[in-house]
Amino acid sequence: MLPRLVPRLQPSALALYGAPVIALIFTLAFGYVLFASIGRDPLAALHAYFVAPVNSTFGLSELLLTALPLALIGLGLAVGFRANIWNIGAEGQLLLGAIGGGSVALALWGEGVPGTFVLVCLTGALTGMAWAAIPAFLRIRFNANEILTSLMLIYVADQLLGYLVHGPLKNPQGFGFPESRLFSAEAQMPLLWDATRLHVGWLLLPVAAVGIWLFLSHTLAGFRMRVGGDAEPAAAYAGFSRPGMIWLSFLLTGGLAGLVGAMEVAGPVGQLLPTISPGYGFAAIIVAFLGRLTPLGVVLAAHLLALILIGGENVQMLGVPSSVAQLFQGVLLVALLASDVLVRFRVVWSTPARRAA
Amino acid sequence: MEDSLWVAILIAAMRTATPLILAALGELIVEKAGCVNLGVEGMMLVGAVTGFAVGLTTGNFALAFVVAAVAGAVLSVVYAALVLVFQVNQYAAGLSLTILGGGVSAFWGQPWQGQNMTGLQPTVIPGLSDLPVIGTVFSRTDIVTWAALAACVAVALVLTRTRAGLILRAVGENHDSAHALGYSVRWVRTLAIAFGGAMAGMGGAYLSCVMTPLWIEGMTAGRGWIAVALVVFATWKPARVVLGAWLFGAVSVMQIHGQAMGLAVSSHILAMLPYLVTILVLVLISRDATRIRLAAPGSLGKPFKPA
């Protein structure tokens, strides 16, 4: 008896929404074995990882705060991935948003302009868009692979941030540490929930999710994106502009990632530092796939990924390295991609027929 | 004095190019078989951490490179399974490998995080090392640098002059025809992918055992991605991989020798150069879409579904 894959006539909806569950169960099982293999009580470790961090109201607020960047970037990526357009450089667009927004915050430092944080967010979104426009332009005009160019620009953005906090934007009273001044109060995101770090930026999440849902399911441009991904020849035959799709998906994701970057530095971080993101731009790729490229799914998946990021910090108390979070992300994505085989194929167990000579 | 600076730059460029040559030659074979593996960065990281661990604990660098190659190959099998068995999109599968490799190396490498060691030393060949200039280059480069160049010749010969190379190219150019001729597309691709993983693993080991003999999380810093870009830049020709890698080596070295050459530019700005140059050469080479289409293997990136 050997398993054989037989193509389905229709993609299976059950498998489509079941695959993330299978992947999650596999990841938890992997975690159980991993914690046991390094001599920890697996159930206690899994509890410390996935339950303890959200066992308090503060913990819950931290989950919402961490899920926000993942969900916003994931929403943008979902639109692009739908159209088979691969923006892998959201991390760089996030950094540029932080740089752009942070520069405004520092330029208006101590000026006491009310509502500076709005300007910070807008500038962040625009600089993120501008950074995303580079790979989009290079793809359309010069046919350069957008995966590689957008990825290279992450490292450029990282060095740019390093240059700025070591040089022009360094705090003059900072004893030479590579960090900017702390933003003044009016440049910081107002808090939404007292005694937590959750800020008003969270209100943008439902707006963005509903907006992207409306766009994908109720507009012609959204329909074009879906056709462009599902059946590129059909999209080309229908005259749907490929450059238009590339521009739209890059500018959308770049804008959202830039906004996220600005909200991070004007929110929980409060200043420009050499490192401001624990890899949100990469984790958001997993979020988009795990959320089945649908807005509601992305929002749910963002909270799961946020839990994986926060849990990694929490198990350090048990002497488990926090990099276990990255390991779980990798295992989750691999398991998800593998489970997705069930969407388009069904497994048939059969004994190979003996061929007549 | 001028001379010695230029020789120093040449040597540094050759050493910087070595991990790129190793990883890119591996990826070239994978792509010649029709698959794009974007997991090179992850496989290099796994190779770097295993190579470092073995080098540090045993002091045996030959063993370190072998173990790193095996580790890279083992990780690449995950990609092979996803793409060849589970019918996953090649880009997504490669990305997952990069994330997984980053996670595995960071988690497993935690005990060695930030440690350093005495790396592999240059091989001194009596007589040869006494020659002017060439002798200096020989006496200050290590055996792996030269092995990488030999690997380039070997890859080129296997691809163009052997039956195995012909089968590999047939599978990459048109997997349906190769399948119809009775070749096992899956096995050929699995072997090619494992070879790519082993080469990337050794490229990573070169970083952590020779170039900068230490282990830090994410120490490859995008070199795996540059290796993927190099294959496009080389239009899938092994000799051009070496040329491209030397170009990147030279640009990267600017970062180290920039100040010595009197460049009053921030080290952060100089550190951007290799990435900017990668983008630039990608743009220059991709501009001619027809040329890329003709040079690329015909079945590159397409899913293989045997009837």
Image (tube, coloured by chain):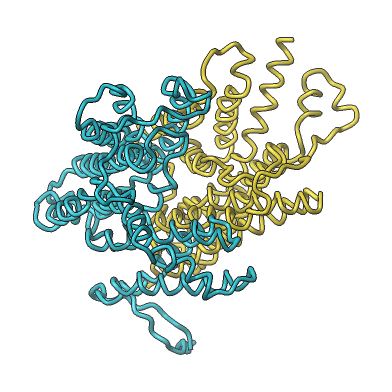
Chain colours: A cyan, B yellow
Q: B64 left or right of A193?
A: right
- Whether B233 is drawn above or below A233: the answer is above
Q: Which residue is at the front of the view, A184 or B79?
A: A184
Residue A356 seen: no
Q: Quadrant of the N terminus of chain B?
A: top right
Q: Which residue is at the front of the view, B27 or A189?
A: A189
User: Residue B284 lies in what quarter of the image?
Assistant: top left
Image location of residue B177, percent across then percent down = 42, 62
Q: Which residue is at the front of the view, A10 or A216?
A: A216
Residue projecting furthest to the right: B126
- Whether B239 is drawn above or below A57: the answer is above
Residue projecting furthest to the front: A195
Image location of residue A128, percent across then percent down = 30, 35
Residue shown at 68% from the left, 41% from the top: B148
User: Residue A115 lies in what quarter of the image?
Assistant: top left
Q: Quadrant of the C terminus of chain B?
A: bottom left
Image location of residue B135, percent across then percent down = 81, 24
Q: B90 left or right of B48?
A: left
